[in-house]
Image (cartoon, rainbow, N blue to C red):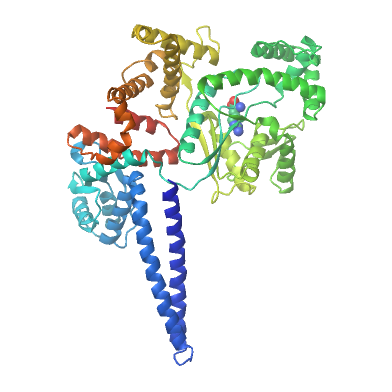
Amino acid sequence: MADFDNATKSIRNIEKEILQLKSEIADTRKGLGLELLDPELKKLMEENTRLRHRLEILQSAVKHEQSSANSNEDAVFSIIGQLQQLFAEAITKAYPGLTVPAVITTSSSAKFGDYQCNSAMQIVQQLKLQSIKASPRDVAEKLITALDRSVSFIDKVEVAGAGYVNVFLSRAHGEKYIMNILKEGVVAPGQERKRVVVDFSSPNVAKEMHVGHLRSTIIGDSICRFLEFLGHDVLRINHIGDWGTQFGMLIAHLQDRFPDFQSVSPPISDLQAFYKESKVRFDSDEVFKKRAYECVVKLQSGEPSYLKAWNLICDVSRKEFQTIYNRLDVKLIERGESFYQSRMQQIVAELKAGGFLEEDEGRLIMWGEDRNGIPLTIVKSDGGFTYDTSDMAAIKQRLHEEKADWLIYVTDAGQATHFQTIFSCARLSNILDQTKHRVDHVGFGVVLGEDGKKFKTRSGDTVKLAELLDEGLKRSMEKLIEKERNLVLSPDEMRAAQESVAYGCIKYADLSHNRNNEYVFSFDKMLEDKGNTAVYLLYAYTRIRSIARTCGGDFANNIQKIIENTNITLEHEKEWKLAKVLLRFTDVILLITKNLSLHHLCEFVRNSRS
Ligand SMILES: NC(=[NH2+])NCCC[C@H](N)C(=O)O
């Protein structure tokens, strides 16, 4: 990878130099034309010759660098990318005046080849506008004639149906590609290294961490792993809700229930119950309510005993969250809403000064660019800040202090409008510049129970995450015993298998569905040993490992030598089919980079398996 990066860099530098030289040559020429009789003429001509010579040297250096980078390029070969380029060139060559994009898709069935170009129909439409009549099939034929066929990865192209160009890949290229994976390993397509902040999981203190947060945790963690694999610099942020007005009532209740909380740590085992108790008092007792409001003000102004009470409460939640993250092997940096307190004051002042805030029934609001939908509430009528304020402060902190190039927020789809408004307001106030920064809200659908209704316990309560994971462990153990794994595995191995199966299944079931859709949580389905499940993949993986083991120690020790001396041939149709799936790797990675939908990766893995 490093070699490839270096080669790319030096090609870029050389190309820059070439451009500079070309412009110098042009300048020299101009000089020649204008001052033919100048005594400097001879000198300029010499200079011109020298520059031309240098140019030739550099051009051959580019060729050399490119071919030495090629061995790695084969490992990160984008078929769709290459075909798009080739067909775009063919379109320009065959129809110089038209601007029709080269649309490339994978073919729906093997008899239509491996990939197809679907641009002929659109070209016909455009020609029609110019009163030129042509049939899609004729256009497709013309594209084939214009297509550069010197590339090695295409075996044949043919016209099919209503004007599709079907592309068949070359087996020899497939063999070369597979050899490359063996030699180089699985290589990520090189991309410019970006600093990415991924905001995910983000539960709220004292409220339950529910299945929505579980989805955010799983999807967010997987996106981080994906981006880290690509070599990006990823900051995993847990934007926990630790600064809302709910802390007023929680602190007031803490003061009453545990008056000595300053010296003796309060034994709150069930923070949710504690939250419910304080909420009941808040809703029914006016005096308590007033005190709760006063507590918020004291907390936000940083009074030590209030900060202490707040910290104690946060700590209870923090520990609960951490056990879940440990179980799921998820790493996160906690940076909750409270982190932005001083930055919220600052951003409010800045937005005010910039004239972006409007008064609305005592509140200060900010509209997005099109003044449609719901504006942000930046300051409440009581002077307090909101979720919106913290997100405006956070977006600025991430882009300007963290110097992130790319921000990703993983929450339920219900918050899509909130984030679009945040992005819009950040653009308006020049915090966000989308020519430099990329921002994505990665939304996901709600989790449903097997009855198709919102995921709840039998008694109608929200399902506690720890209990859900426990249930997963129980079910996976039952499955392992049903398969008589206990007869061959030691108790420690059983425990390891139990966890891999349980947590693997919960994660994979979530990731394998298009995240935008609702998702039905079903232990029965996710623990099936057939179909698109983690269990099936774990079986496949175990079998591969067992094949390697069966080959014996010699094989493992000499694998590098064996790779050097073995030529892979794709003789059997099934081998060729599998190789064609593997050939899609780069395109799958590039697609996920665009839409951050990990089910494409699950599909890729599933297809490689069949
Ligand atoms: N920057 C953010 N707003 N991140 C997402 C926070 C999610 C929020 N705490 C919730 O539970 O819905």
> Is 424 rendered above or below residue 337?
below
Determine the residue positioned at 51% across, 41% down: 232
Say which quarter of the image contains residue 368: top right
Say which quarter of the image contains residue 537: top left
Residue 9 in view of the camera: yes
- Is residue 391 shown left or right of residue 520? right
- Is residue 21 shown left or right of residue 209? left
Q: Position of residue 522 (x, y in %)?
A: 41, 15
Determine the residue positioned at 35% across, 6% down: 487
Nearest to the observer: residue 3 or residue 331 = 3
Determine the residue positioned at 45% across, 53% down: 6
Nearest to the observer: residue 595 or residue 315 = 315
Nearest to the observer: residue 384 or residue 275 = 275
Q: Quadrant of ligand 1?
A: top right
- Quarter the C terminus occupies: top left
**Disc count in the image?**
0
- Quarter the N terminus occupies: top left
Q: Position of residue 67 (x, y in %)?
A: 33, 55
- Is residue 193 shown left or right of residue 278? left
Determine the residue positioned at 44% across, 40% down: 593
Q: Position of residue 108 (x, y in %)?
A: 25, 36
Nearest to the observer: residue 143 or residue 287 = 143
Q: Position of residue 68 (x, y in %)?
A: 35, 54
Residue 115 in view of the camera: no
> Is 608 rendered above or below residue 72?
above
